[in-house]
Structures are given as C-alpha cells and as structure tokens.
C-alpha cells in the first residue's frame, strides 16, 4: 500500500554545542553564534518515514517546516536523503508563536496538504525541549497520536504498529491511521545524504531565495519544476491571524535570566597521595562517607 | 471551583512518585492561593487508591475507574481531563513531565486553548503588570523553566487562559506527607459520559516495564562520570568506587550520549535532579544543564584535569588531576582508613 507521509521538521540553533559567545552580555541568547541545524529527533523521524517509503513502493515523503526563509535548508536536507518534496511555512505573522500557535499554523498547512496517511515528527526540538507540538497538531486535526516512538514496525490495513520507548520499558501499540507519530532519539539514526540526490536538488530554492541569487536559476527552475520549493504564508494556508504568532499564544514570557550559579569557596587539591588520604579522612570524620 | 488539579499517574496500582511530588507542591500553592487541592486518578481497579493520595493534603479526589483506562492511552485520558476541567474550571493543572504527562498535557492544552509549560523547575505565585495593555494580574502561576539547552531560565505565565498548565520532571519537587490521617472527598467520574468508544483507537499490544535498577534520587552518595571518562570501559572504575563507598553511579548527558552509561543514570535538567550528601563529579566539565540537576548536593567533589572547569566553581573540593589516577586512590585510602 502506498502511503502519503508528512514529516514535520524544524531548523534549530544547536543548543547542545553552546560556545563561549553564545550568550550576550545582557543575558540574552546570541542566535547568530549558534549554528542552525536540522533538529536531531526530526532526523530520526525522517528515517522512519523513509523506511516506510522503502517498504511501501509508491509512497511519498513531504517535509513540512515552519521558520524564517533560511529554514528552507531543512527541506533541501530532507530531499538529499530521499524526501520527495517540501513546504516552508513562513510569514512574519507566525513569529513569536508558542507551541499552541505553532501547532495551529502547522495543522492548517497539513489541512492544505489534505491527503496524508501518517504525520511523523521528532519527539521534541532541542531549542525548547517541550515535546508539545506533535500531540497538539494531532488534537487539532482530530486524529490519534503515538509519542516516544522508537520503531514503526509495520503499516497494514490502515493501522500502524509502533514500538514506544518509555522511561522504564517499552510498549508496542497499534493505532488507526491517519495519526501523528513522534519519534525518540533512541530510534535508528537518519541515513546520510545521497550523492545523486545532492546533485539533483542542490539548486532547489524557494521563491524568496531565487530573488536573492542571479537570474541564471530562473531558466533551470522552469525546466525542472522539482527545484521550486513552495513557500506558504498565513493567507496561503487560510490561517486566522488571531491564532497565529504572539496573539495566538496563551503563554507569555515574563522574563528571561541567564543562569548564574552561586560560586563556593573551594578547597584545591592535587592527585598526590597524602592529599587524597587527608580528604578521605576528613570525609569519614564528618560522616559524609563511611 | 478554581482549584488546583494534579493528574496522578499510576503503574501497577501505585501512584508515581512524580505525582506525589506534585501533590506536595500543589498543596503549598493551594495554601498560598487559599483554594483546594484536587487530584485525578484514571485507571482500572482503583479501589482504595485514596489511601495513597489523601496523606499529601488532597481535598477532593476524582476517580475514573474502568478496565479500558489502564494501561494509559492518550485519547480516553485526554477526554476525561478535558470534560472534567470544563466542568470544574481549575485555575492550575499540574502533571508529571513523563512519557504520560508529556503525551497528555499538550493534547489537553490544545483542546482547551490553555497554555502549557513543559519541564518546569520551579513554580511560584506572583503578580503581573502588562504595561502595553494596561492590565494587571494577581496571583498568576509563575512557570519557571530552563530554555536553550539550559543556558537561560525563563519565567512563563498564562495571563488570560485557564487552567494554567505545567509539567514537572520527577525528582525536581520534594514529596512530603502532610498528615497521614488527612481525609478528602472522593468523587467518581462517570466514564461513559466523558469518554467515547472512538477514543479507544490505540491498542496496547505488548508492554515490558522494568523496575528501575538505578536509584539516584534515594542515594546519599553519587559518583557521576562525564565525557572526560573517555570510554565505557573507563566508566567501570566509577562502579568500583561506588561499590566500595556505598554510592550510586550517575552520568552527565555527554557521557550518556557518548554511550558510556545508560539513560536512566543521567543527571541534569533532562535527566534526574539529585540532592545527595556527597556528589563526586569525575571528568565532568559542568555544563549548566548538568549543574542545575546536582547543585543542591551537600558536598561536591570535582575531579578534573582542567583547573578551570566550570564545575569547580560550585565544588567544595577541587581535585586537579586525572580520574585514572585519583579514583583508584580514593578507593585505596577509603579501604585503608575504614578498617
């Protein structure tokens, strides 16, 4: 059975590799100093989608992402690995969205895509670690969800069988499709980029990106329609502005502080035998150990 | 009306620690707000479950007891909470930041259009002045959580929507029995009224749950290793030290990501929060997200080759040296002096 698969992917600042200049003096995040990457668990999600496509000939994988213009990179990265097409949801009106406003926008885009069997995304994005957008998209679409997925074992007769990885064990569940599945980092890593696909898609660009480069691309894109990456605005997906961005976000950030820990007066030791033995004696004397 | 609700998760008839921790927090918030604390338990065979819940100061316990409600699946539990919240109009709703709470919370918040803050590390009550709109708010829930990989701490509020929802990880709040004889009121939920048959579209086919082998939260001494341990093989010396001094072994996220230790040993914002009597950090540089999960340890020893490792600033003892050299010496001199 061929499947229509939508992969939700996000471009995120690489918060796991925060360098010294990542924080500005005023305690805010210097986004420019953090490289933008494909959210790690979204790559695990993409791999699950590509495996379903491999097993079910005729299936298609569509990347859906929301973000600024440069987030189109996420679509290209998906195409290089075997996705078939992608949409970038981008509009100033989406800015400042919390998870509810984000899931509202994404669910409107999925309604525009219309024809889908399964929506797969990463469990959470590393810039917020909330794990909320997947379940909220499912709720807004009125379809079930399976979170913490580690392996989509099979899709048959309109049902997916999914192995979940929980804190203290595993669970295998069956879910009626269409459904949203969010994938854990413990799932199989994503396959590397395919050299042929890089050749095919390296000039794939959004309309905005095309305006920024020399005109030579226009002809190329006309000859090869797959190089045109679709951008969607608030109006394109018929979203109600009231539910987008800041105004669609019930949560507000009251304040942000950079993290400062109370420094202690510490005793400095070396690895010398007498110093280690003294330490042990001291800890035993005050009943910290023993 | 307008009380504080805590969703209690349940495994094999036992209410999860994370839920009891939230009941304790919920009790203190309820005292501040001068409202009631209500708990919700959804599952099967729940007779007598109140005895696990009331001692934490629960005034009203809502019970949804139906064979189909255990083990947890998203839609039936969501339907119950949505309908219960519409009826009871809580001002605050709390749940564990677990694979259950993080599955259920967002779905409920989406249906009710109420904001949800994930993985809070602190919950407080405070006021808010919205200068732009010229509005002021009293007694909001401050939902305080780390963001950006732990590099910043944000205070989130939901000024206009109710309930104000938050999830909290296990071990972040402290559980404390208020009164072993505390008695609240039990209210049975009419499951058929709240749940549709179509909610049972997810079927649990197989379940393998294990009792946790690791007890970091309860350990009075923790030996934790970081990326500086270099390999899984090298990590073994931490188990050796731990068994000699009676400690549990923990790990930083970098060590877990590097495959040196299992995920359940992870300490930090995305792992467990610990407060042992003694914390021995071996080859841990001290990323903010790690320090946030262990800074309340009574005594901290940092062993690191880098004299400028960030963890040194919060350590009581800083040993500048390699773990390969220091750890065997700790074992040796402990054995020598404990005889």
Image: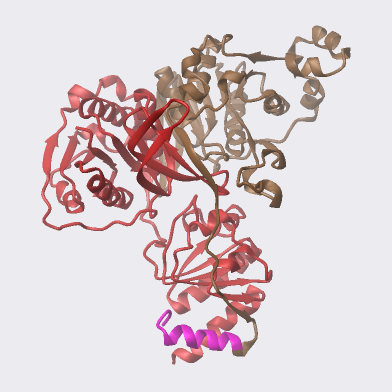
Chain colours: A brown, B red
Does the rendering let one see residue B286? yes
Residue A285, magenta (yes or no): yes
Q: Is residue A11 left or right of residue B223?
A: right
Q: Residue at x 58, y 69 (%)?
A: B282
User: Percent position (x, y) of residue B229?
Assistant: 63, 66
Above or below — where is A23 with respect to B205?
below
User: Percent position (x, y) of residue B185?
Assistant: 11, 41
Image: magenta residue range: A275-290
Q: Nearer the viewer, residue A281 or B88?
A: B88
User: Percent position (x, y) of residue A212?
Assistant: 81, 18
Above or below — where is B30 with respect to B179?
above
> Residue A89's quadrant in the figure?
top right
Q: Is residue A248 left or right of residue A220?
A: left
User: Percent position (x, y) of residue B9?
Assistant: 29, 43
Q: Residue at x 42, y 20 (%)?
A: A140
Above or below — where is B288 with respect to B67?
below
Quadrant of the drawing holding the C terminus of chain A: bottom left
Residue B45, magenta (yes or no): no
Q: Nearer the viewer, residue A89 or A33?
A: A33
Q: Residue at x 29, y 56 (%)?
A: B175
Above or below — where is B38 with respect to A218?
below
Does the rendering let one see residue A172? no
Assign the magenta stretch its main secondary structure: helix
């Amino acid at each position: 059975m061929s499947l229509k698969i939508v992969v939700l992917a996000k471009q995120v600042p690489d918060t796991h590799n925060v360098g010294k200049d990542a924080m500005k003096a005023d305690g805010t995040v210097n986004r420019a100093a953090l490289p933008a990457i494909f959210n790690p668990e979204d790559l695990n999600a993409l791999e699950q989608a590509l495996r379903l496509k491999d097993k079910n000939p005729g299936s298609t994988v569509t990347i859906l992402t929301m973000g600024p213009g440069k987030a189109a990179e996420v679509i290209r990265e998906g195409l290089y690995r075997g996705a078939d097409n992608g949409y970038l949801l981008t509009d100033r009106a989406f800015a400042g969205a919390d998870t509810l406003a984000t899931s509202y926008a994404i669910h409107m885009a999925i309604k525009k895509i219309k024809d889908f069997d399964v929506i797969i995304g990463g469990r959470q994005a590393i810039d917020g670690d909330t794990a909320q957008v997947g379940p909220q998209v499912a709720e807004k679409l009125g379809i079930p969800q399976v979170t913490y997925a580690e392996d989509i074992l099979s899709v048959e007769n309109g049902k997916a069988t999914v192995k979940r990885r929980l804190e203290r064990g595993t669970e295998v569940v069956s879910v009626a499709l269409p459904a949203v599945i969010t994938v854990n980092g413990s799932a199989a890593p994503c396959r590397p980029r395919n050299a042929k696909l890089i050749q095919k898609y390296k000039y794939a660009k959004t309309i905005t990106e095309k305006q920024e480069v020399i005109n030579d691309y226009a002809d190329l894109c006309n000859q090869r329609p797959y190089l045109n990456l679709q951008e969607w605005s608030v109006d394109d997906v018929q979203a109600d502005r009231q539910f987008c961005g800041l105004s669609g976000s019930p949560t507000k950030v009251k304040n942000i502080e950079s993290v400062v820990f109370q420094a202690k007066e510490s005793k400095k030791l070396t690895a010398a035998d007498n110093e280690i033995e003294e330490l042990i004696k001291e800890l035993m004397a005050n009943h910290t150990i023993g | 009306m307008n009380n504080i609700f805590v969703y209690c998760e349940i495994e094999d008839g036992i209410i999860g620690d994370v839920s009891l921790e939230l009941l304790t927090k919920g009790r203190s918030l309820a005292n501040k707000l001068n409202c009631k604390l209500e708990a919700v338990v959804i599952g099967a065979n729940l007779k007598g479950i109140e005895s696990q819940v009331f001692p934490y100061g629960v005034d009203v316990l809502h019970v949804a007891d139906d064979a189909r409600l255990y083990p947890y699946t998203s839609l039936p539990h969501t339907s119950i909470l949505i309908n219960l919240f519409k009826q009871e109009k809580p001002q605050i709703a709390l749940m564990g930041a677990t694979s259950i709470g993080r599955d259920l919370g967002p779905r409920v918040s989406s249906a009710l259009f109420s904001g949800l803050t994930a993985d809070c590390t602190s919950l407080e009550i405070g006021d808010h002045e919205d200068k732009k709109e010229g509005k002021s708010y009293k007694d909001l829930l401050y939902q305080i959580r780390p963001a950006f990989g732990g590099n910043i701490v944000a205070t989130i509020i939901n000024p206009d929507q109710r309930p104000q929802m938050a999830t909290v990880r296990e071990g972040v709040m402290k559980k404390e029995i208020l009164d072993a004889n505390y008695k609240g009121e039990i209210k049975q939920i009419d499951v058929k009224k709240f749940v549709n048959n179509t909610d049972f579209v997810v079927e649990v086919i197989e379940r393998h749950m294990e009792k946790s082998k690791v007890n970091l939260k309860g350990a009075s001494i923790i030996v934790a290793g970081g990326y500086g341990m270099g390999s899984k093989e090298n990590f073994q010396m931490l188990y050796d030290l731990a068994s000699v001094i009676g400690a549990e072994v923990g790990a930083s996220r970098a060590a877990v990501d590097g495959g040196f230790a299992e995920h359940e040993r992870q300490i930090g914002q995305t792992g467990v929060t610990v407060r042992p009597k003694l914390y021995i950090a071996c080859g841990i540089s001290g990323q903010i997200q790690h320090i946030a999960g262990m800074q309340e340890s009574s005594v901290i020893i940092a062993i690191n080759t880098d004299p400028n490792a960030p963890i040194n600033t919060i350590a009581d003892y800083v040993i500048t040296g390699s773990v390969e050299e220091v750890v065997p010496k700790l074992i040796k001199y402990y054995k020598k002096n404990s005889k």
